Image (cartoon, rainbow, N blue to C red):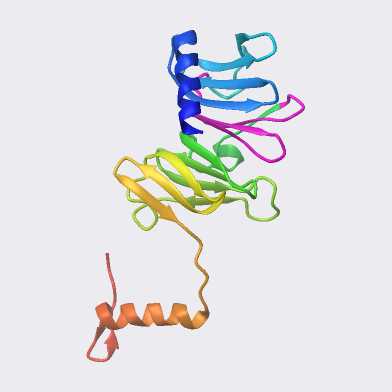
Amino acid sequence: FQQTEKLEKSEFIQTLGIPVTSILVRNNKTLIGTIQGLYIYDATSGKISKHESYGIDGPLSTRISCMDMDSKGAIWIGTPIGLSALQPDGSWSSIQGTEGLPVEEITALKIDNKDRIWIGTTQGAILYKPYEEGRQWFYRAGKRYLINDVIKDIELTDGAMPVYFQTENGISKIEKVSRTLDDKADIIETRLNGWHRRMGIVGGCQL
């Protein structure tokens, strides 16, 4: 798949004469994300056309960072100023900070097998659950989660967690771990005994 994608990218780069950031195929049309706009290749006619509208009825920006498609046929597009979505009926919508997006400068995007969107940014990782009730946004940044907050690419394991993030300083992994209350208590007690208990008393901790 990666070899095919690279071949397609090289062909489109040669045809368009500009860097290609992402390629996505839906039905008989190929969407081509570039640093200068969104292009559509029609396999039936063999022609490439540029999507003309941006901000409204199109992606938020002409600079396309990444793209992926969920099981419902919606195409999600990352840009430096937010997240855009192209629905199967052809309608467009966008999400920015005012709609809940923690960081707008998107650098990478992958959708897992539960239609949850993993988003890489210049300031950490975001998990977005667009089709689920309740809390939809989860933001992960800093050394507790990532070796570096600038994310360059994302890979999923068997379509789900754990999720691997390629950062400027290496690869980080985020996974869901189930623990009992006793397990959590043991972890906390071990840390207290090893670092904060002095003469039988737990001392204060300041960073």
Q: Is residue 79 magenta?
A: yes
Q: Residue at x 55, y 38 (%)?
A: 97
The residue lying toward the viewer, choosing from 40 and 107, is 40
Residue 10 seen from this side: yes
Vertical relation: 24 (above or below) 193: above
> In the image, 42: left or right of 195?
right
Vertical relation: 162 (above or below) 184: above
Picture quarter containing residue 185? bottom left
- Residue closest to the far bottom: 200
Task: Give the image location of residue 68, x and y in percent.
Answer: 58, 34
- What range is drawn magenta here? 62-91
Task: Give the image location of residue 32, x and y in percent.
Answer: 55, 20
The residue lying toward the viewer, choosing from 161 and 64, is 161
- Report the number of discs: 0
In the rendered view of the protein, which quadrant contains the C terminus? bottom left
Q: Residue at x 49, y 9 (%)?
A: 15
- Residue closest to the far left: 199
The residue lying toward the viewer, choosing from 143 and 111, is 111
Q: Residue at x 70, y 12 (%)?
A: 44
Vertical relation: 17 (above or below) 122: above
Picture quarter containing residue 53? top right
Task: Give the image location of residue 73, x and y in percent.
Answer: 70, 34
Task: Give the image location of residue 171, x and y in percent.
Answer: 35, 48
Q: Is residue 68 magenta?
A: yes
Residue 80 seen from this side: no
